[in-house]
Amino acid sequence: MSAAFVSWGSLHVRRGSKRSTLCGLQTRSLADPEPDVVGRIEPRDVVDGLAKGSVDVVDVREENSREGGWLVGSRKIPFSNLISKAGKGYADDFSTSAKIVFHAGDGQVMAAVAARTLHRSLKARHHKNEAEVFIIEGGFGALVRHFHTRSKLFKELDLDYWISNAP
């Protein structure tokens, strides 16, 4: 089966036989004069930020997701809930956050879309909030590759799944 490319906003996604994977993330869309608000953060900075309490991590996988384990200290907000409410129901929860990191397991596209949605909602409701919004550089798989199953960072991590499905 040949791979087809689809464009959705400033995201370009390659659809394969099993799952969608991120092929490229433009920093600026021609249709949108505003630069991309989503940055990338190194996995070790996510871990350090969680330990210091300076980073809020949001897991946007759907409730029925079977993608590996949970990152200890992350907040679970299903992607469909966040998008259907355009982030409005969650903007107040993150109004004092300085750094917000989104992850969606191996779905980096979902993480980037969720990050943009919440960022726009924060700007609309809390004009003075200057939170930085990130997705994990290399995806959640890169975070997993930096650590092992005995780490206190992960709960119920299926390392075999992440090794075989890492981006």
Image: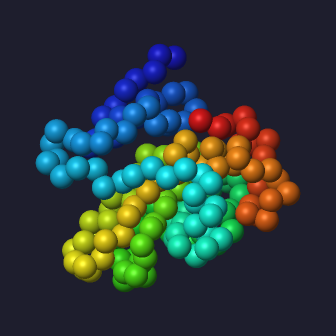
Seen from the viewer's position, the closer of residues 142 and 103 is 142
**Measured from the top left, where is residue 89 in percent x and y?**
37, 79
Q: What residue occupies the far top of the structure in this picture? A: 2
Q: Is residue 41 left or right of residue 68?
A: left
Seen from the viewer's position, the closer of residues 39 and 2 is 39
Residue at 82% from the left image edge and 53% from the top image edge: 149
Q: How many marks?
A: 0
Residue at 46% from the left image edge and 21% from the top image edge: 3
- Where, by quadrant of the figure, is residue 19 drawn? top right
Colour setting: rainbow
**Measured from the top left, where is residue 134 in percent x and y?**
44, 57
Q: Is residue 45 left or right of residue 40?
A: right
- Where, by quadrant of the figure, is residue 85 drawn? bottom left
**Measured from the top left, where is residue 33 in percent x and y?**
14, 48
Residue 17, compared with residue 157, is above or below; it is above
Q: Is residue 132 left or right of residue 15?
A: left
Residue at 52% from the left image edge and 46% from the top image edge: 137
Q: Is residue 167 visible?
A: yes
Q: Is residue 78 visible?
A: no
Residue 115, compared with residue 73, is above or below; it is above
**Measured from the top left, where is residue 76 in percent x and y?**
56, 69
| Quarter of the picture holding the C terminus | top right
Seen from the viewer's position, the closer of residues 97 and 155 is 97
Residue at 79% from the left image edge and 65% from the top image edge: 152
